[in-house]
Image (tube, helix red, strand yellow):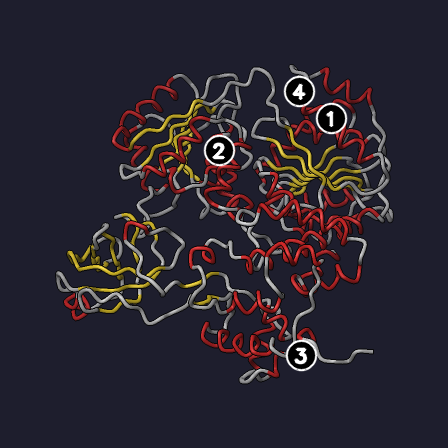
């Protein structure tokens, strides 16, 4: 038996400077062994090897710029700031300081050469540097002290970049004597031209001076590709294990109740679209297998996902089981409650709901109704995940806007059945997710798409309008409200910000109350308490207010058929997919609807081209693909929730070309449990317990 030490079982305390206290700090990052440290890869790199022309600045990229001081101003706003404008041969940028003194201000003499390092961000004058590191240099001096890219690592309290770089340097030195196991097939190793896994790790922790800066910053170096492939493979394998775990469990056998479905459809003023019927059939095939369904249904705004879910619920309920419908907000839950009551109560099904705002007495009654099986359909929010919620016979859980919930939350409903059977799961989203992203983020789920809108739906007309025509836009709202329809005005921020020139909801609300006196204008934003938000939204839905000034909290789920006009201020601050979601709040009735993108006067050509995508397309999938190209996957998936696994190196956008091959290799490796477990342990390790929910 081979008892030689390996990187995986050499404790991190062998490294110089790591005592029990630092070991506890490292454990917060799931670093327990030297191998864990080596696979704790840089988030990004600092490029201090060259000076970047000001005209080439991009957001989210750390750079060094050098230029002459053009002017210095003290700006008086909500917060006083020192603004230093510098210029090189290609353009100008601003260095902004909120904490400064007279001596510092005076040091920025006009014409003096200053070199600064930092991350440019959008500000009131364009791209600006906030509190950058800087030094004054001799005119014409261009040599830099750094010869290689500097890695930046994920940190936790008690750990600095210099400390983790020092520890990683020791770990890389150990690679000379201990090589990590090569777990990929030889054919994959050859794809990237990297001799060994050890050489790829050493290269990425400390890129040599001759490394291609452009290639590494773009995530396209063979060492990055080699490790990204392995990480994507580990995530694929753990999700397949989760899927296999589900497939080995028992679930309710659900029959089709064609007569009940026909009775429901006969009450509707429209027929199912072909896409809705196809997805209904796919769901029913899953429900009839006796193993737990795990299916995601994607559908653009207005495609009819809720009706598809109701038909699935109908078949489950008439097969003798309960159905839980979980929504991320109380107002969306209430919307589902009303729809399901309208559609299913006439068929004899009983419906109850459970949300946070219920009184203690009503909550007790709801819990008893659920536990005794007196209701077949239970609609609610996160409240349904709580431990004291006990279902008599849960057969199906429907999760709406599933990206608002973590993996562990969705899977916690597995424990809610008393029958020894695992409930089926149907998760829905109105955020179209590009297929590439879905294949990586949700590969344990089967995948259905409702890619057809009901006939007669009028496409929303979208216009790009400059802030200089703001008065014209306000007049347009007046005309719409006088006709008896309603409107939204969306602002990206709640209150003023020195760092962004975006509009704020509170100020806009005050201005519009004056400009549109005589109309009831409501306001809702994320800083209101949940009960206040619900009250404002409910009032708008009832038509008690004509205009709703809001932040992006209205993005999901509010259905107000009488709303026909949407104004989105500073749309350049938002992603295309989010703008499409917001736009989908109108166009839900029979009237023609319009969306006005009220952009700032300093809109760049790039931003105009981006917004043009929205103007030219009402297809959420086309828009989502463009958004993935432009902004990357994080924005599309929303904030990562507890239980969701994050990538260390892989990026669904940068490494999309690897995904088909990852799936091909993964299908072969699934049968090798020992090898799969080693890959999963290496990349996901102590977070794998999410799959045991």
Using the rendered image of the protein, determine whether residue 389 is visible from the camera's viewpoint.
no
Structural distance between the alpha carbons of marks 3 and 4: 60 Å
Q: Is residue 104 left or right of residue 650?
A: left
Q: Is residue 264 above or below residue 287?
A: above
Question: Which percent across, then down, holds residue 291?
Answer: 84, 42
Q: First in sequence, mark 1 or 2: give its number.
A: 1
Q: First in sequence, mark 1 or 4: give its number.
A: 4
Q: Is residue 664 above or below residue 234?
A: above
Structural distance between the alpha carbons of marks 3 and 1: 63 Å
Give the camera-side residue of 299 and 180. 180
Residue 420 tag number: none
Residue 273 tag number: 4
> Could you tell me which secondary element the residue under label 3 belongs to?
loop
| Of the two numbered discs 3 and 2 in the rendering, the one whose residue sits closer to the viewer | 3
Q: First in sequence, mark 3 or 2: give its number.
A: 3
Q: Name the residue tied to disc 2.
A: 580
Q: First in sequence, mark 4 or 2: give its number.
A: 4
Q: Name the residue tied to disc 1.
A: 345
| Of the two numbered discs 1 and 4 in the rendering, the one whose residue sits closer to the viewer | 4
> Could you tell me which secondary element the residue under label 4 belongs to?
loop
- Asked whether the residues under the numbered discs 3 and 1 touch, taking CB atoms below 8 Å apart as contact, a structural biologist would say no
Mark 4: give few (<14), some (14-19) or many (20+) Cα within 10 Å.
Answer: some
Residue at point 36% right, 26% down?
519
Q: Name the residue tied to disc 3.
A: 10
């Amino acid at each position: 038996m081979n008892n030689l030490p390996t990187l995986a079982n050499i404790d991190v305390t062998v490294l110089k400077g790591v005592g029990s206290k630092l070991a506890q700090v490292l454990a917060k990052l799931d670093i327990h062994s030297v191998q864990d440290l080596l696979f704790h890869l840089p988030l990004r790199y600092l490029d201090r090897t060259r000076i970047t022309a000001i005209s080439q600045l991009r957001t989210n990229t750390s750079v060094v710029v050098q230029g002459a001081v053009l002017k210095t101003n003290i700006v008086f706003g909500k917060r006083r700031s020192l603004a230093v404008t510098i210029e090189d041969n290609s353009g100008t940028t601003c260095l902004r300081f909120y904490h400064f003194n007279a001596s510092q201000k005076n040091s920025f003499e006009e014409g003096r050469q200053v070199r600064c390092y930092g991350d440019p961000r959008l500000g009131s004058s364009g791209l600006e540097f906030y509190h950058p590191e800087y030094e004054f240099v001799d005119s014409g001096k261009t040599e830099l002290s750094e010869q290689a890219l500097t890695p930046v690592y994920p940190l936790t309290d008690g750990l600095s970049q210099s400390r983790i770089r020092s520890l990683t340097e020791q770990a890389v030195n150990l690679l000379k004597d201990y090589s990590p196991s090569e777990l990929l097939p030889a054919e994959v190793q050859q794809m990237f031209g990297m001799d060994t896994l050890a050489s790829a790790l050493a290269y990425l922790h400390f890129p040599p001076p001759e490394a291609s800066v452009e290639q590494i910053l773009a995530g396209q170096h063979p060492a990055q590709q080699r490790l990204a492939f392995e990480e994507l493979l580990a995530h694929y394998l753990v999700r397949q294990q989760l899927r296999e775990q589900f497939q080995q469990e028992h679930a309710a056998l659900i029959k089709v109740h064609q007569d009940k479905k026909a009775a429901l459809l006969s009450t509707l003023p429209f027929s199912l679209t072909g896409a809705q019927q196809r997805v209904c059939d796919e769901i029913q095939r899953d429900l009839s297998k006796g193993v737990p369904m795990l299916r995601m249904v994607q559908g653009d705004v207005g495609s009819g996902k809720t009706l598809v879910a109701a038909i699935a619920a109908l078949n489950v309920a008439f097969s003798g089981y309960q159905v839980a419908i979980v929504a991320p907000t109380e107002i969306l839950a209430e919307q589902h409650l009303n729809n399901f009551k309208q559609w299913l109560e006439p068929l004899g099904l009983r419906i109850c709901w459970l949300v946070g705002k219920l009184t203690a007495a009503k909550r007790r009654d709801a819990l008893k109704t659920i536990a005794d099986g007196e209701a077949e359909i239970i609609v609610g929010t996160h409240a349904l995940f709580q431990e004291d919620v006990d279902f008599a016979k849960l057969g199906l859980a429907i999760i709406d806007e599933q990206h608002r919930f973590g993996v562990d939350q969705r899977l916690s409903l597995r424990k809610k059945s008393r029958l020894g059977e695992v409930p089926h799961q149907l998760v829905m989203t109105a955020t179209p997710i590009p297929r590439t992203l879905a294949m990586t983020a949700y590969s344990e789920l089967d995948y259905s798409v409702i890619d057809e809108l009901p006939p007669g739906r009028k496409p929303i007309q979208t216009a790009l309008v400059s802030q200089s025509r703001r008065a014209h836009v306000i007049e347009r709202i007046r005309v719409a409200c006088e006709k008896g329809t309603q409107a939204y005005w969306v602002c990206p921020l709640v209150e003023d910000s020195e760092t962004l020139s975006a509009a704020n909801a509170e100020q806009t609300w005050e201005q519009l109350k004056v400009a549109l006196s005589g109309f009831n204008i409501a306001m809702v934003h994320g800083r209101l308490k949940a009960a206040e938000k619900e009250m404002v939204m409910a009032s708008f839905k009832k038509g008690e207010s004509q205009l709703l000034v809001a932040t992006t909290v209205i993005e999901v789920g509010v259905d107000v058929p009488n709303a026909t006009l949407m104004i989105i201020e500073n749309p350049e601050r938002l992603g295309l997919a989010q703008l499409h979601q917001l736009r989908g709040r109108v166009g839900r009735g029979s009237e023609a609807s319009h969306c006005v993108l009220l952009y700032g006067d300093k809109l760049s050509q790039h931003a105009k081209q981006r917004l043009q995508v929205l103007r030219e397309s009402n297809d959420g999938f086309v828009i989502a693909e463009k958004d993935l190209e432009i902004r990357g996957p994080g924005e599309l998936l929303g904030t990562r929730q507890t239980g969701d696994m994050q990538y260390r190196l892989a990026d669904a956008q940068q490494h999309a070309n690897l995904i088909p091959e990852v799936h091909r290799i993964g299908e072969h490796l699934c049968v090798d449990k020992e090898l799969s477990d080693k890959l999963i342990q290496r990349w996901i390790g102590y977070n794998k317990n999410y799959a045991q929910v």
